[in-house]
């Protein structure tokens, strides 16, 4: 595999950033053309590199000149190939959008210099084959993230959001560094290729502090530390409090942050999948963290009135979904989710910025709200939605078995794919209860088409990404086996979750069509309190703000030189 295209892909944004800094005062707003041209070149060479990966499978390029422990390695495999294309394409779109959106901003040149630099660091992160250089790129992303969030230096809220981001991300960065130290102590190398080879050839599981009462399993200890890095970078509860602060950044930056940086946790798990695949305890914790984050993020999103805060908490929920997939052993499905989320969330943020800009420059009164009678309850769409939500996913799975050769009923992975497809399509169906004036048969057909499309997409994506990223025989089965629950607990969770979804769907549809369920007074009061609690983000941000004045004297005392 020729290494020139991937080196051009990585170096182009760095060169653009350097040229922007050097000639920014001379060129003014024309520096945007430099960044856009560099990203166009980077995107083209990224596609060429991906084509080479399909032929030659992978590339490991060592850059000489440093001691062996510090020698950087460019590792371009199938995972890195996908991520490089995603980052370069999304960054190119954001650069093009920003050229006009940021016009008139006094920090126009600084913005493009930082944005190109961020793109370079992200490309370096996903192509790093050495844990030390991976950490340096990871930590640099933290500083650039905080810098971008506090980009508006005149805003006190932006400065505070930047400091909060740096603090929270710093915890995860320290955990990542400790995990790297633990891996080096256990395996004696920081090179990923050598690490994975040693992991496969080890006669027994390595330990830390062997022979002492502090002896720990090295793989479990290191992966648990990595979970903290995943939680902070991918905004998992309760380390999500930096994420709402991203709305203080310019909208193109918010798009880049939510489309690229928060996905780093899913990439980290997949990059070190051989480690996570040998630690069931860590996978269980990832599932619990991801499921809790998905529920809290989605619930909080539904209560927000600000469009950018709504999108921010939507990202939190989606990242919880991604981490939950990793916890279930569906690493490849998490990468599909990562790519899909990056593309649609970047689009949503850029579109929201366009509407916010129009609202500020084109004053218009809102359209008068139309009041209409509540439509009567219609059994046809309700019954159709209930029937296809329960039955059709299984039929789709059975039909897809002959097309994509998914082995049915061999492990819990089948139920995982089925349940993800079912939940996602059910969420889409929930929105259809608002279609009040459309004929029942149209709603029914829309439900049918939605469920079929989403179900087949999940199955195809799960199978295609799995075979592409992990083509080795038995590798994926080992991941699912490591993440497998006790069968009784697994079945109970699936059944309870299904009953909750069906019950909520019935209540929503009935309420939209005039049916008011008789709820106890205590339950109604609890609903109000929950709504207010989620509106306030479960008061986590308020708690941090309350503790900050008490922590300030402690930080000042720690900085004071000794007498």
Image: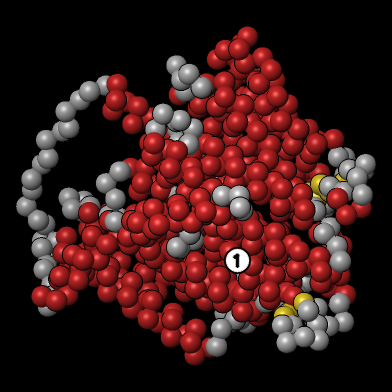
Number of on-image labels = 1
Q: Is residue 158 above or below residue 402?
A: above
User: Which is nearer the eye, 264 or 332?
Assistant: 264
Between 472 and 437, the residue placed more toward the observer is 472
208 left or right of 505?
right
Which residue was labeled with disc 1?
227
Question: Residue drawn 81% across and 69% down?
Answer: 185
Q: Is residue 333 above or below residue 313?
A: below
Look at 52% across and 21% down and name the residue there. 108
Q: Write the residue at 57% across / 24% down.
A: 110
Residue 187 position, x and y percent, is 84, 69
Please report the residue visible at 69 percent of the width from the left and 36 percent of the height from the top: 120
Examine the rendering and report whether any part of residue 327 can be seen. Answer: yes
Left or right, residue 59 beside residue 123:
right
Question: Quarter-wise, where is residue 509 in the image?
Answer: bottom left
Give the farthest residue toward the bottom: 488
Residue 256: x percent and y percent? Answer: 53, 39
Q: Residue furthest top?
A: 26
Q: Secondary structure at mark 1?
A: helix
Residue 542: % across, % down: 33, 56
Relative to residue 205, is residue 445 drawn left or right?
left
> Which quadrant is home to the N terminus?
top right
Looking at the image, residue 127 sits to the left or right of residue 162; the answer is: right
519 lies above or below 111? below
Q: Position of residue 173 (x, y in %)?
A: 63, 55
| Front residue of this view, candidates 403 and 11 | 11
Q: Nearer the viewer, residue 557 or 340?
A: 557
The reply to whether residue 346 is in sight is: no
Q: Residues within 10 Å of mark 1 (few under 14, many from 20)?
A: many
**Way the structure is coloured:** secondary structure
């Amino acid at each position: 595999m020729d290494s020139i295209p991937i080196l051009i892909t990585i170096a182009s944004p760095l060169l653009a950033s350097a040229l922007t800094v050097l000639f920014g005062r001379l060129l003014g707003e024309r520096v945007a053309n430099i960044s856009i041209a560099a990203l166009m070149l980077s995107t083209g060479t990224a596609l060429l590199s991906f084509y080479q990966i399909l032929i030659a499978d992978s590339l490991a390029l060592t850059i000489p000149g440093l001691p062996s422990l510090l020698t950087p390695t460019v590792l371009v495999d199938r995972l890195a190939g996908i991520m490089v294309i995603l980052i370069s394409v999304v960054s190119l779109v954001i650069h093009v959008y920003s050229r006009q959106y940021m016009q008139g901003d006094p920090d126009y040149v600084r913005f493009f210099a930082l944005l190109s630099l961020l793109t370079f660091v992200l490309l370096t992160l996903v192509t790093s084959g050495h844990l030390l250089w991976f950490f340096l790129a990871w930590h640099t992303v933290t500083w650039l993230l905080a810098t971008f969030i506090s980009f508006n230096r005149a805003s006190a809220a932006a400065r505070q959001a930047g400091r909060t981001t740096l603090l929270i991300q710093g915890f995860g960065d320290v955990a990542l560094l400790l995990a790297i130290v633990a891996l080096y102590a256990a395996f004696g190398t920081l090179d990923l290729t050598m690490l994975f080879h040693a992991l496969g050839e080890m006669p027994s599981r390595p330990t830390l502090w062997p022979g002492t009462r502090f002896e720990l399993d090295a793989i479990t200890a290191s992966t648990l530390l990595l979970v903290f890095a995943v939680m902070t970078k991918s905004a998992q509860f309760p380390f999500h409090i930096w994420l709402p602060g991203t709305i203080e950044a310019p909208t193109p930056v918010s798009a880049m942050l939510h489309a690229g940086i928060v996905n780093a946790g899913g990439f980290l798990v997949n990059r070190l999948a051989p480690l996570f695949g040998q630690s069931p305890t860590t996978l269980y914790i990832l599932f619990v963290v991801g499921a809790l984050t998905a529920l809290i993020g989605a619930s909080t999103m539904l209560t927000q009135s600000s469009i950018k805060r709504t999108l921010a908490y939507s990202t939190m929920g989606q990242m919880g979904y991604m981490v939950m997939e990793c916890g279930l052993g569906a690493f490849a499905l998490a990468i599909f989710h990562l790519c899909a989320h990056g593309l649609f969330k970047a689009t949503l943020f850029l579109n929201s910025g366009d509407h916010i800009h129009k609202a500020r420059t084109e004053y218009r009164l809102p359209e008068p709200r139309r009041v209409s009678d509540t439509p009567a309850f219609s059994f046809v769409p309700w019954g159709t939605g209930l029937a296809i939500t329960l039955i059709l996913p299984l039929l789709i799975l059975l039909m897809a078995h002959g097309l994509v050769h998914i082995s049915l009923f061999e492990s819990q992975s089948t139920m995982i794919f089925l349940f993800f497809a079912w939940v996602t399509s059910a969420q889409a169906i929930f929105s259809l209860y608002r279609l009040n004036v459309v004929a029942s048969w149209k709603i029914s057909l829309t439900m049918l088409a939605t469920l079929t499309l989403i179900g087949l997409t999940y199955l195809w994506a799960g199978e295609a990404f799995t075979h592409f990223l992990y083509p080795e025989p038995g590798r994926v089965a080992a991941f699912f086996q490591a993440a497998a629950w006790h069968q009784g607990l697994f079945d109970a969770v699936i059944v309870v979750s299904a009953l909750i979804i069906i019950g909520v769907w019935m209540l929503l549809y009935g309420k939209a069509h005039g049916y008011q369920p008789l709820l106890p007074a205590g339950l109604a009061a609890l609903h109000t309190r929950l709504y207010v609690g989620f509106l306030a983000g479960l008061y986590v941000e308020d708690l941090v703000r309350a503790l900050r004045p008490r922590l300030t004297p402690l930080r000042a005392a720690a900085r004071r030189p000794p007498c």
